[in-house]
Image: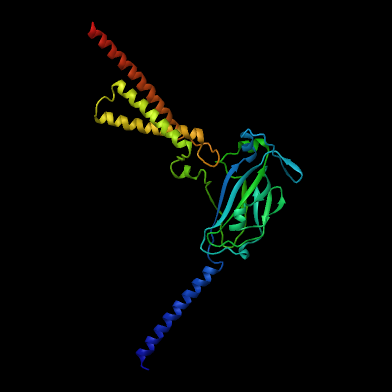
Amino acid sequence: MNHQTIQTTAAVVSLIVTIFAVVISTTFQSSGTNIPKKVEVEYTGPTDPLSDLKETKVDLNVSVSSEGQNVDRLIFYQTSITNSSNVPILPSDFFGNMKLVSKQPWQIVAIGRSKYELAHGVVASWARQSDNEFDSPPILLNPGEALNVTVYLTAPEAIISAQKFDDPAPIAWDMHIANLASLEETPNPVTRFRTSVGNILVTIWGWGIWTVLGLFIFLLGTHLLLLTWSGLVNRLNPLGGALVVYVALLSLIAAETINTMIFGVSPLFYVPGDLSSRLPICILNFVVLAATSILSYRSRRRRGKVQRSSEL
């Protein structure tokens, strides 16, 4: 075997060993605890079922008790943790139990799970530790899997009445997982679009579609009629076209804003819309209506005087 053959053989062997080492190292890291993990937390709520039932004006008496004591107000939050990393989170990766903790003066009445979650989702076994804490033994969370729970809470009347959808949830997950720096909280699904599209969320459904359409036709028709009477739009020209487009946009925004004030932004339960960015435009719409009404009145009155003068 000559020197060149030995060098070639050594190079091939070195390449094979290098590839094998890289594959083994990658496999070990991806299946072990050395890869950083990512867990996303989501909170949706609050929902107040007892108050919702009272608003139906149905002769229905519902009472709830916990630990032998009556619960006057009961709300719930939907919350979940999702393994958004590329590696499974094993029970052995946890240091201690998973915990759900409420902030004072909120108290956790119970943690529930739907039949769908029990049949298809990841299930945890929750146990009460105190009025403010429930915990569960560690579970397996494969990549993409989520643990969804419903947390039922109570608090003094003033606290519950003051809780809004934009407020932080009064509950928090507490867990320690290997190679997990912190839990990443995602925005409330009901209000997340407010911060992502310039604080504007448009949601139209059911009768709201007909409400918006009817209001838009009414407002736009009124605008065009007043503009015609005032003489501002009496022929096809750039100014007239610009005014028509302008009042059409004003009418559409005003119709959607009024619809949001009536129906809210959620088809599942009433969520008051954030009108801070649209209400000024809605007010401007009615200011323009008032201004064109005055102009049309003066224009029609002036034309009437001219007509009477010509008759004389």
Q: Position of residue 268 (x, y in %)?
A: 54, 42
Q: Residue at x 35, y 30 (%)?
A: 247
Q: Position of residue 80 (x, y in %)?
A: 58, 52
Q: Give the farthest residue toward the right.
A: 68
Is residue 34 something one can see in this rendering?
Answer: yes
Q: Is residue 246 left or right of residue 205?
A: left
Judged from this view, the residue extending furthest toward the front is 59
Q: Quadrant of residue 145?
A: bottom right
Determine which quarter of the picture holds residue 117: bottom right
Q: Position of residue 54 (x, y in %)?
A: 64, 35
Residue depicted at 38% across the width and 24% down the height: 289
Question: In the rendered view, how is the structure colored?
Answer: rainbow
Q: Is residue 121 visible?
A: no
The quarter of the picture where the C terminus appears is: top left
From the viewer's perspective, is residue 222 above or below residue 161? above
Q: Quadrant of the N terminus?
A: bottom left
Residue located at (67% from left, 34% from top):
59
Q: Which is more toward the observer, 31 or 119?
A: 119
Task: Tell me if 204 is positioned left or right of 94 in this view.
Answer: left
Residue 275, given in percent of the width and then of the height, sits at 48, 34
Viewer-proximal residue among 145 and 94 = 145
The mark tally for this picture is 0
